[in-house]
Image: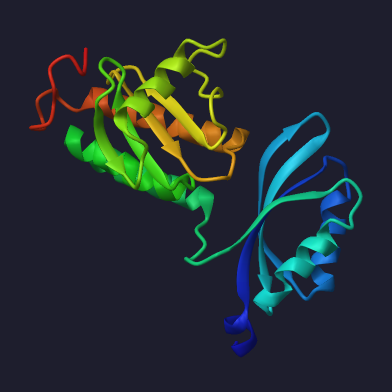
Amino acid sequence: MDTFLAMEMFIVRLWLPDRPGALGLVASRIGAVRGEIVGIEILERDAGRAIDELVVNLPDGALQSLLVQEIQQVDGVEVEEIRRVVDVIHDPRLDALETVAVLLALRDRDELLAGVVLHARRAVGAHWAAVVSLEDGAVVAQEGNAPPAPWLDAFVRGSRFSDRVLSGDSGPDDVVWSALPTAGLALVIGRVGTAYRARERRQVAALARIVDTRWGEIPRGSAPGDRPGTAP
């Protein structure tokens, strides 16, 4: 138990060949520095490569650089990012279910918007989250240090009318958005320096669909913050 408590936890995001045995070789290298993999999430697969996030326990934080060196000894593997975990690690799947349960229980549109920006930060790993009006670009809910309203409005408008309309795939790779068409709003989330991958973008889109559906179920005028023209 004392040894476990002394462990330091890191999240390692890496690119590796999408072939049998590649992850096993990485695990072997992690074991060589007395590290232990305690969580794995596959973020994206494309063109014969995979992007995985590993949660790794190390007996000593000073081994961080050595860990990266060992992993990159595996042919075709690149470490995109490694960061120390300062909070309790959450299970992404459990987080998603808990977020949905919370949002579905809300009976007020203002509370719904406040709830989605609050929980999106944890469930999708964001530094900030905002809900923006598709009509006039006004920010109607926000958590964290989001960019100014004009930037968010320009980002959403530019993304909507790009070649990838409503896909959320255009623009900076550390910002992602998804429309809430029934509400006439958009959910925009971002973080600093870490790209959102395919799995995370799908999570944002799914979260937006749930919120949009719930918005339509809540009677209009149920919240003092309901603005004319926001909902059909």
- Of 101 and 67, nearer the camera is 67
Instruction: Please tell me which residue is depicted at 72% across the width and 42% down the height of the picture.
Output: 51
Left or right: residue 140 versus residue 169 is left
Residue 171 placement (x, y as % from top left): 53, 25
Residue 28 placement (x, y as % from top left): 85, 64
91 versus 177 height, above or below: below
Left or right: residue 154 versus residue 12 is left
Residue furthest to the right in view is 75
- Of 117 and 145, nearer the camera is 145
Left or right: residue 93 versus residue 3 is left
Query: What is the quadrant of residue 109 in the picture?
Result: top left
- Of 71 and 40, nearer the camera is 71
Instruction: Please tell me which residue is depicted at 46% across the width and 16% down the height of the picture.
Output: 158
- Number of marks in picture: 0
Query: What is the quadrant of residue 103 in the picture?
Result: top left
| Residue 158 visible, this orientation | yes
112 versus 170 height, above or below: below
Q: How is the image coloured?
A: rainbow
Q: Quarter of the image containing the C terminus?
A: top left
Residue 175 placement (x, y as % from top left): 49, 34
Residue 213 placement (x, y as % from top left): 32, 25
Left or right: residue 174 versus residue 189 is right
Instruction: Please tell me which residue is depicted at 60% across the width and 89% down the height of the picture.
Output: 2
Query: What is the quadrant of residue 48 in the picture?
Result: top right
115 versus 36 height, above or below: above
173 versus 64 height, above or below: above
| Residue 107 visible, this orientation | no
Instruction: Please tell me which residue is depicted at 73% across the width and 35% down the height of the picture.
Output: 45
